[in-house]
Image: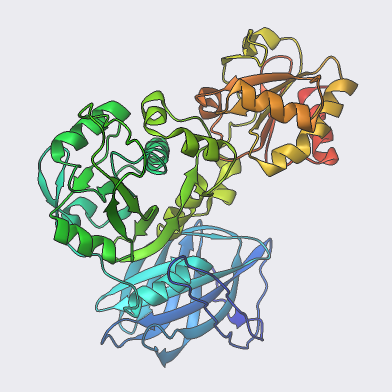
Amino acid sequence: MASGVSPGRAGVRRLLVGILAVGIVGVVGATAGLAIGHRGLTGEIALEATTAGQTSATLSAVDVEGASTVHLALSTRALSRAPTPTDLGVFSIPAGSYARLSVHLGARSVSVPLQLSVPASGLTPLLLTLRGDSVIAYAGNDAVNLGLQLAGGRLTAIPDITFTDQDGRQRRFSTLQQHRITVVAAFLTHCHESCPVYTAVLADLEKTLAQRGWADRVTVLEVTMDPERDTPDVLTAYARMTGATWPLLTADPSALRSFWDTWHATYENVPYTGTPPIDWYTGRPESHDVQHTSMAAIVDPQGYSAFILQGDPRLGHALSAPLAQLRSPNAAAAAASGQHASWTLTDLLDRIDTLANLPGEAARAPETAVRTDTAAPAFSLPSLGGAGVALADQRGHPVLLNFWATWCVPCRRELPLLAGVARQHPALRLLAVDEGESAADVQGFLRDVIGGTQPFTVLLDGQTSAGDRYSVVGLPVTVAIDAGGVVRWVHVGELSAALVDQALAAAGVP
């Protein structure tokens, strides 16, 4: 066990965070003291504690457990009741990952699982909330503020109504949730605008959860705002048509209204002003339209609403054919131009990361990208000109793969730089892999950004199959592959001239 570490860094720290739909700003003061240094890299944690309800407790120490254990001795004091935190000080500890806390409460200790990452020269807020005999830990700005609001009872509990799923089963919300992080998306099967995209982004979420081994940690639900038409039979047909594998839910109209009132979400039936579209289920003209709130809510394991994402999601790929057929031409055109899109799968995963006390997506992306010193995953894709191009055909030449899309602003900035690299190094095979877009969209975009002739090969990854093989979770991503087909360098994010030099050196470009 490492020796005791005293609180340090006099002064005041300010945690400014905005939680969607809650709008909380956390302002927490630090305690003056003496910082004791460690050999090697160190970071700092700002430790706070609070009690929930009528709980009263006294903290005497906390052990932060990882590869080694750091003992934090505390000045014994009573704790404030949430949402007011008691500031226990700022502590210097070795940078690294920690998996558990042991919280000493007088004569007893409580073990608390927590994935805590302490960066070198960084400050990580850490909150302990005590409720009865249990302790819950929250790490990071968003999580700390969320923990204070949960402990203080300032967030809204979700009504535990009874739903009917696409298989006709009666299921209460609490039974569906099972004390997991839960994503609840609003939809209706006859929506021709945002709802098909919500179904698509939930499919992407399900795939990501399975890849990370989180399928038993996060529940995914779609709940209708059109109970008149969305009967279990219609929901079954929609699931079969679109490939949705998660619960599609309806309920008694009054119960359903109380459920959506939790988020102040609205919906109402309205008549069509022109010729109504054909109902995909009955084959007859639709009886009405529904004006509704477009939203996804993220519910914490205790059943409280934690975050809301509103508006249309932006996909990193094209809609599947069944979902694309449901969208109106106007909605599809607006999506292609980037109108109305307000959040992405990465934004949704960031909220899940916060509730799970895990690193955010920006920290995770370099870890989930394809590994260096491993064989480059094979793929074959159509080029912008229509010819098929296989990665295996590039063997014997150094290769740069660049995953990009027209809607990606950093991609737009770095493409001229890549064009210059391709012109300067004719022996280099530079493959620019567009993720999820059509040839027409890409051709017009490149003409505007680079000019009429591209000095590199543009590939169309319409179903993101190559991106999936390279674990691309954000754009742009650049991969340097040597002449033997081995990945030698990976960068997530925008390239600079210096980074390009690193990539070329790694790929073996003279």
Q: Is 505 placed above or below 343 here?
A: above
Q: Residue furthest bottom?
A: 77
Q: Is residue 386 left or right of residue 227?
A: right
Percent across and percent down for residue 106 are 33, 85
Residue name at image x 57 percent, y 85 percent: 29
Q: Nearer the viewer, residue 486 or 154?
A: 154
Would you identify the image quadrant in which residue 92 lies?
bottom right
Q: Which residue does the image show at 66% across and 86% down from the upper left? A: 11
Residue at the (78%, 33%) spot, across then down: 449
Observer-nearest residue: 152 or 328? 328
**Colouring convention used in this rendered image of the protein:** rainbow
Residue that appears at 47% across and 46% down: 313
Residue 31 versus residue 17: which sits nearer the camera? 17
The residue most toward the front is 274
Eyeballing the image, is 459 above or below 235?
A: above
Q: Name the spot of residue 63 as percent of width and height, x first.
A: 45, 71
Counting every numbered tag in the picture gives 0
Q: Quadrant of the C terminus?
A: top right
